[in-house]
């Protein structure tokens, strides 16, 4: 039997509910499909910070490095400074492990209507650059208490950073419907994003079989709602991708539906899989969190590990569960986190 070493970081809020629910499903799937997850659990996050002063230990990346993948819930608690979860955990892993692709798929689900009731053919992937851009956290506050105070953050876009994520997006499009929209705001961010445009256009020339369009973020946001069927692969920057993928979750029907992978395509480091939403402390501890985005993230992890048949079966079991009307509260249903996981297990073939 094949086995994969998985580092599990449930995190805070609903993380310790949705992560075990998803892993219970994957374990059952593994029994059917002939693989096993060897799991090590790490209780890192904002709760750990309150206890120890650290989100993760200073050698956290060294600890995670030998694993085949990291399966992550979400970090953050209302009583902890909200600037810390990204700085002290998420960005550390994403940049430390060169997970420069944030893969965030969006699709129409069966069994319920999202807010775009008449849109039945939504199926695209947001490929968000995940290590640089607007989130490099280089900047400073000057005299913050003074009337002349100011705050500055610098965006950093490097040729290497743009090229590598662009190649990933175009190669992904070659395996899909052969269309890339690259999203910028280069009419106003005239240094950084015109450079982004230039490098992406150069990369696009190497993929003549892929249609390539440039679109501004404002127009793109409107089109996510009005004409989402336009999109196949949406290639964008760190900040724009963060926002667009939440909008992607919303047009599916809920933030709780979005799965994602932080991918190191070269596989030099482990990739990390997590739902797109945060730790949702407002609903934590009540067995009402939607586990579907986390389970979708598990399917993406299996695909990354080469278990593509199992990943397809997992998606099919989620679809059957939703089609039967076994839905979480955020989608208008009555089923709890665990009941949904159990129903998906029943629908595994
Ligand atoms: P972050 O910035 O870390 O992504 P956030 O501040 O955007 O987090 P979330 O924790 O994602 O906030 O929560 C936003 C809203 O979505 C909350 O009302 C939360 O309850 C709801 N929500 C998020 N995830 C789920 C889920 N899995 N199931 C149901 N509701 C959810």
Image (cartoon, rainbow, N blue to C red):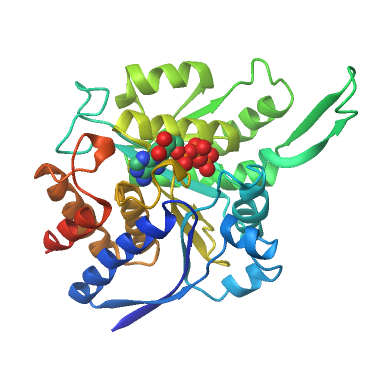
- 197 is higher (above) or lower (below) than 286: above
- 280 is higher (above) or lower (below) than 349: above
> Which quadrant is home to the C terminus?
bottom left
Q: Quadrant of residue 34?
A: bottom left
**Residue 82, percent from left and from top:** 63, 42
Q: Quadrant of residue 53?
A: bottom right
**Residue 223, percent from left and from top:** 39, 19
Total numbered circles: 0
Q: Residue at x 73, y 41 (%)?
A: 137
**Residue 269, percent from left and from top:** 57, 66
Q: Residue at x 38, y 37 (%)?
A: 255
Q: Residue at x 31, y 55 (%)?
A: 295
Q: Residue furthest bottom?
A: 1
**Residue 182, percent from left and from top:** 51, 30
Is residue 105 among the parts visible in the rendering?
A: no
- 111 is higher (above) or lower (below) than 48: above
> Which quadrant is home to the N terminus?
bottom left
Image-quarter location of ligand 1: top left
Observer-nearest residue: 134 or 47? 47
Q: Residue at x 59, y 53 (%)?
A: 90
Q: Residue furthest left?
A: 324
Q: Quadrant of residue 178?
A: top left
Is residue 153 among the parts visible in the rendering?
A: yes
- 193 is higher (above) or lower (below) than 63: above
């Amino acid at each position: 039997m094949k086995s994969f070493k998985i580092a599990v970081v449930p995190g805070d809020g609903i993380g310790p509910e949705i992560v075990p629910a998803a892993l219970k499903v994957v374990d059952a799937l593994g029994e059917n499909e002939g693989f096993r997850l060897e799991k090590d659990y790490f209780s890192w996050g904002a709760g750990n910070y309150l206890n120890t002063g650290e989100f993760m230990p200073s050698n956290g990346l060294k600890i995670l490095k030998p694993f085949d993948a990291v399966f992550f819930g979400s970090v953050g608690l209302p009583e902890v400074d909200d600037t810390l979860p990204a700085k002290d955990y998420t960005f550390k892993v994403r940049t430390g492990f060169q997970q420069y692709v944030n893969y965030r798929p969006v699709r129409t689900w069966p069994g319920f209507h999202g807010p775009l009731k008449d849109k039945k053919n939504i199926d695209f992937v947001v490929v968000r650059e995940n290590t640089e851009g607007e989130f490099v956290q280089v900047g400073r506050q000057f005299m913050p208490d003074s009337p002349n105070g100011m705050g500055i953050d610098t965006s950093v876009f490097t040729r290497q950073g743009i090229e590598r994520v662009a190649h990933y997006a175009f190669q992904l499009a070659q395996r899909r419907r052969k269309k890339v929209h690259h999203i910028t705001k280069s009419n106003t961010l005239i240094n950084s994003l015109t450079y982004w445009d230039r490098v992406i256009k150069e990369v696009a020339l190497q993929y003549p079989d892929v249609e390539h369009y440039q679109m501004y973020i404002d127009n793109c946001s409107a089109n996510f709602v009005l004409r989402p069927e336009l999109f196949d692969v949406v290639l964008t920057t760190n900040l724009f991708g963060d926002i667009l993928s939440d909008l992607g979750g919303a047009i599916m029907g809920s933030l709780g539906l979005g799965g994602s992978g932080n991918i190191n395509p070269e596989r030099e480091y482990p990739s990390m899989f997590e739902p797109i939403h945060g730790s949702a402390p407002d609903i934590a501890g009540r067995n009402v969190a939607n586990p579907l985005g986390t389970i979708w993230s598990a399917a993406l992890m299996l695909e990354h590990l080469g278990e593509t048949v199992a990943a397809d079966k997992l998606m099919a079991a989620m679809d059957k569960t939703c089609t039967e009307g076994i839905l979480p509260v955020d989608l208008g249903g009555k089923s709890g986190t665990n009941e949904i996981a159990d129903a998906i297990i029943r629908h595994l073939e």
